[in-house]
Image (cartoon, rainbow, N blue to C red):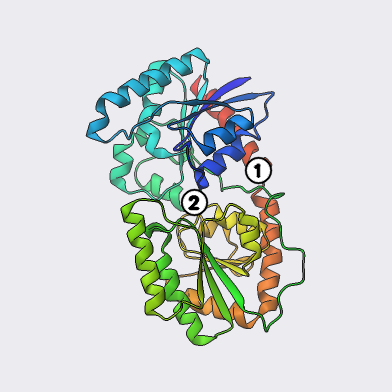
Amino acid sequence: MIPILYLSHCGSNIGGGEKQLYYLVTHLDRTSFDPYVICPDDGIFAQQLRNANIHTTIIDLPHWRKTKSILSRHISSSKLTDFAKHNNIQVVHTSDSWLNPYLWKLKKSLSIPVISHVRNILNPTQIAKYDFDCMDQFIVISSQYKQFLVDHGIASKKIDVILNCVDLSEFQPKHIPQKNQSDPFVVGLVGRIEPFKRQKEFVEIASRVYHECHNVRFQIIGSSLENPKHKAYEREVREFVAKYKLDDVIKFTGHQNDMQSAFHEINLLVTLSAGSVIAEAMASGLPVIGTPIGSTSDMIVDGVTGWVDKLDSISNKIVQFVNDRKLSNKMGIAARRHAERNFSIDLHSKKMQTIYLKVLNNFR
């Protein structure tokens, strides 16, 4: 078996990146690959990995670029190197590109190939800061991200586009009759309440839609982190709801552990930030509307499983769904079929395994 080391961004929480990493390491061909995961802290995600019998170790991975971590980052690099050497690691794969400097140190010390997973929107300064030119291979979650890397000097042959996956057995359509035309049409936005997820813009969209048709309701699904910046943003979002007099129209659900049930409560997902939630919603038989950012255009088949459009056009698309439930149902069925063909965990893991073998062959 080929021992592969994964560096996780977090061990104490489960976000989209952690969920994707879990899908991957639990579905590798264990006759060929042996996964090891390093988490920077302990908690719910690290325990989930242990429960799945994945080798899981806690090593602090302080932010490389912060001055206060100069000493601790070198101590952590030394621990990582010793760990990789002891376990005969053959490939290192980070689930977050901010950890690239740790990969670069491992590559220099042990002469093994390193793979960086790009899940976020970047800028040119970040590419220079985080040792992108030192990586052997990149996995990006959208063609948009690939083009950005190519435009900033990364060779196209070093970049593979692999979309996020979803557990198709966990996320399934609701097998009861669809709500009739007289029931409120429910639109949801899913994600941590923070500026990147753009809940304030969602409230503005809701206001425009409600002005056109009253037979609609909205849900903001998620909660903010316990930090001043995110809490302040949540207050702003709630103030927007009050400003537009939408207190009875927009519901804050808070954090949801059972996302399948949450999807069954809505008729449509709107996303303004992309992410694995698109695959989850489509697997649940929901159409999705998003803006052309990140993986959105790669995952939504425009006009078939939903729409990809500019921000100020989204309200018109929602109104179209509210007034035509048959169209919504038709696109929801198409969304599930598309998810089955393109977002399965097995397909995702097979693509990853092919990349590991390719990188090892090129490195030798």
**How far across and down, in percent of the image, does residue 281 sit?**
61, 59
User: Residue beneath label 2, please?
Assistant: 143
Q: Is residue 162 left or right of residue 200?
A: right
Give the residue displayed 68% in from the left and 41% down from the top: 346
| Residue type, mark 1 in image | Ile
Dot 2 amino acid type: Ser
Give the residue furthest to the top.
86
Task: Say which residue label 1 marks.
Answer: 345
Q: Secondary structure at mark 1?
A: helix
The residue lying at 57 percent from left, 48 percent from top is 164
| Residue nearest the viewer, comparing 259 with 20 | 259
Where in the figure is residue 317, as x and y percent of width and height? 54, 76
Which residue is the extreme one toward the left?
67
Tell me: 105 left or right of 296: left
Residue 167 horizontal/vertical position (percent):
66, 47
- Measured in 3D between alpha carbons, the distance from the residue under mark 2 to the one under mark 1, in whole angstroms, is 20 Å
Q: Nearer the viewer, mark 2 or mark 1?
A: 1
